Image: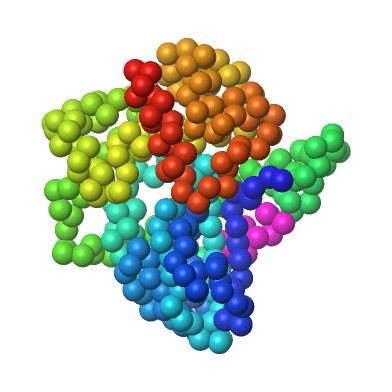
Amino acid sequence: MRQEKVTILELEGGEVNILNAEKESVKLTKTGLFLCKAGSVTLTIDGTEYHMHKGSIIVYFSYSTLHIISHTANLKGTLIGANLETIQPMLYNVSNFNALFVIKQAPHQIISEAQQQALNQHINLLKQVASKAAEERLDTEPHPNRPVIEIARKQAELLSYSLMLEVLQCYTDVTPRGGSFTRKDEVLQKFVTQLYRHYRTQHEVRFYAEQQFLTTRYFSTIIKECSGKSPTQWIATALLVEARNMLSHTNMTIKEISDALTFPNQSYFGKWFKNLTTLSPLDFRKGKTEKNREEKNFIDVVQRGISYTEKSV
């Protein structure tokens, strides 16, 4: 079964164990937001407690730990989650990464009535288009309405991007804790910006360290400390997500994808991809299921690929 790129759920307080996070903490597999429309909920993300009520939003990231402490019976809200393959291409067009780092520091915000209405409009449009695109999604046979379905899929992508920009807009006037970024925050911010510009051609940590006039070891220590992931993991994640996207949504040959991502050759790319996903690029394109596709922590898969890469270099 094809995994949904974007999941939209309308939640109510009467539901039992939302996201299975009330009994115990859970690792989130998607990035997204929760818009509270009524009632209240108290939750923790990565150990920090937040109290939400009507008119507030919270953005959560993959690999974060969520625990719902309590919620009122009249809780209502919209939960949206998207996988990394959906979000990463959108980030290519985000020129100001400041909002992303502000969100990481202050994910919970009270938004205005106008911002609530704008988010709801985007969400409702996205739900309509997603519903239309899903009508024939599982049909693998030629269908006279296939062009219409493809248009709906593209509409959903554009609306998702527009929704992401609307969310970022809610954080543009937020002041980070402490009033400004620390030097380490700036290093991470610049790295993420440079990564999404250069990861297709620059796979070495040394390149990104030199951009900030830092030694590779010190640079790696900062990135790991601030993000929980090493620079190598960041690079491997970016490459793997883009490789999956190209295999799924383009007609490029595997050699062309390998060349576009600046791998030494097609054979190396194939071994690297299979080590991370348990599938060859061709099997992935055919729609075969990865053995570890449902793992809770995507980094575990990336780490296997990193180990392979380090042994091969």
Question: Of residues 99 and 82, which is closer to you in this image?
Answer: 82
Task: Left or right? Give the position of 110 relative to 288.
Answer: left
Identify which residue is drawn at 60% across, 39% down.
291
Question: Of residues 209 and 274, which is closer to you in this image?
Answer: 274
Q: Position of residue 139 (x, y in %)?
A: 81, 42
Identify which residue is drawn at 32% across, 58% down.
104
Q: Residue 43: in sight, yes or no? A: yes
Is the residue 127 above or below the residue 290 in the image? below
Task: Left or right? Give the position of 183 relative to 235.
Answer: left
Is the residue 306 above or below the residue 163 in the image? above
Q: Position of residue 29 (x, y in %)?
A: 50, 53
Badge count: 0
Q: Quadrant of the C terminus?
A: top left
User: Bounds of the magenta span?
Assistant: 121-131
Identify which residue is drawn at 25% across, 26% down.
207
Q: Residue 125: in sight, yes or no? A: no
Identify which residue is drawn at 30% across, 65% down.
106
Q: Position of residue 58 (x, y in %)?
A: 42, 67
Name the quadrant containing residue 280.
top right
Is the residue 141 above or below the residue 103 in the image? above
